[in-house]
């Protein structure tokens, strides 16, 4: 099952994708905080604008260097424990929203990732109980100002600027994420093509580790890391992220004058 957050020009709604008809079956409310009751209304997918499937009310938690090949391409060792950073919820945008390059960076990169959406308040979750706190999965782009990441010594400006966390197009429920393709394309050219089976620290381990640091709240998102192939994006380009079983979405790249 895949769930969209969308608008038809009014307030946002949620809907279950009917893959046979390409329609969204409208839900009565936010499924993370309620249930999957439907209104009976159906909206053709072509008639809606897809939004980020979740806007975290608390935080986006990133995991760095969680693919060995990506750590190697950046000249880094794989950390023995997950490398954790935060992105504010103001960094989140949805499909087709512009990625606005920050004025303080001249070298911004794409990073395609599988993202985990948390279902409920939790703390100190053991790995074997991780599935109990997962609502579903989505795709994300951990957009990174690489030059600033190198010079600042910490990653807040590099990874936390507005529009630096595109997510979409759906939240997939009950998805087996042990071996899914994770890809990024820039203007149609494949840049990243990895698999979640290559994750150094798997999803249950990440949830256990992160929940030992932070209390996780419904709608919090954990970015699980990016495979090799990261590279620069520039004004006028379009960046697409795809995760198998979830779908693909893209964003144009702009810079404010």
Image (cartoon, rainbow, N blue to C red):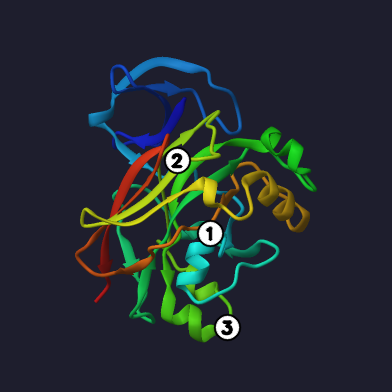
Q: Which residue is mark 3?
A: 153
Q: Which residue is mark 1?
A: 67
Q: What residue occupies the far top of the structure in this picture? A: 40
Q: Under tag 1, what secondary structure? A: loop
In the displayed structure, 59 sits above or below 27; it is below
Which of 183/165 is in front? 183
Q: Under tag 3, what secondary structure? A: loop
Which of 113/162 is in front? 113
237 left or right of 14 in image: left
Which of 235/257 is in front? 235
Marks 3/1 in contact by CB < 8 Å: the verdict is no
87 left or right of 131 in image: left
Badge 1 or badge 2: first in the primary sequence: 2
Q: Under tag 2, what secondary structure? A: loop
Badge 2 or badge 3: first in the primary sequence: 2
**Residue 138's spot in the image, x, y percent?**
47, 42
Badge 3 or badge 1: first in the primary sequence: 1
**Residue 227's spot in the image, x, y percent?**
46, 58
Can I make out residue 160 in this image? no
Circle 2 or circle 3, nearest the eye: 3
Instruction: Please report the residue visible at 56 percent of the width from the left and 65 percent of the height from the top.
Output: 65
42 left or right of 29 in image: left
Instruction: Please report the residue visible at 27 percent of the width from the left and 63 percent of the height from the top.
Output: 253
Circle 3 or circle 1, nearest the eye: 1
In the displayed structure, 218 sits above or below 4; it is below
In the displayed structure, 108 sits above or below 39; it is below
| Cα separation between marks 3 and 1 | 21 Å
Q: Which residue is mark 2?
A: 53
| Cα separation between marks 2 and 3 | 32 Å
Mark 2 surroundings: few (<14), some (14-19) or many (≥20) residues within 10 A: many
Circle 1 or circle 2, nearest the eye: 1
């Amino acid at each position: 099952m895949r769930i969209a957050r969308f608008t038809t020009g009014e307030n946002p709604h949620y809907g279950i994708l009917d893959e046979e008809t390409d329609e969204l079956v409208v839900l009565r409310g936010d499924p993370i905080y309620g249930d999957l009751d439907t209104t009976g209304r159906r909206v053709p997918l072509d008639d809606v604008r897809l939004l980020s499937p979740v806007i975290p009310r608390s935080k986006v938690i990133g995991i760095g260097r969680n693919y060995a090949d990506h750590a190697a391409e950046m000249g880094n060792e794989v950390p023995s424990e997950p490398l954790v950073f935060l992105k504010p919820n103001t960094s989140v945008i949805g499909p087709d929203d512009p990625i606005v390059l920050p004025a303080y960076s001249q070298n911004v990169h794409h990073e395609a990732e599988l993202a985990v959406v948390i279902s409920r308040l939790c703390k100190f979750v053991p790995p074997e109980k991780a599935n109990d706190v997962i609502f579903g999965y989505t795709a994300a782009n951990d957009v990174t100002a690489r030059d600033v990441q190198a010079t600042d010594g910490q990653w807040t400006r590099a990874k936390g600027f507005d529009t630096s966390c595109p997510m979409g197009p759906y939240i997939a429920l009950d998805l087996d994420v042990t071996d899914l393709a994770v890809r990024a394309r820039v203007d149609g050219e494949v840049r990243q093509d990895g698999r979640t089976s290559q994750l150094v620290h798997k999803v249950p381990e990440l949830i256990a580790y992160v929940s030992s640091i932070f209390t996780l709240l419904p709608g919090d998102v954990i970015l699980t890391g990016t495979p090799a192939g990261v590279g620069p994006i520039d004004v006028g380009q379009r960046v697409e992220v795809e995760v198998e079983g979830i779908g693909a979405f893209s964003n144009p790249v702009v810079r404010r004058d």
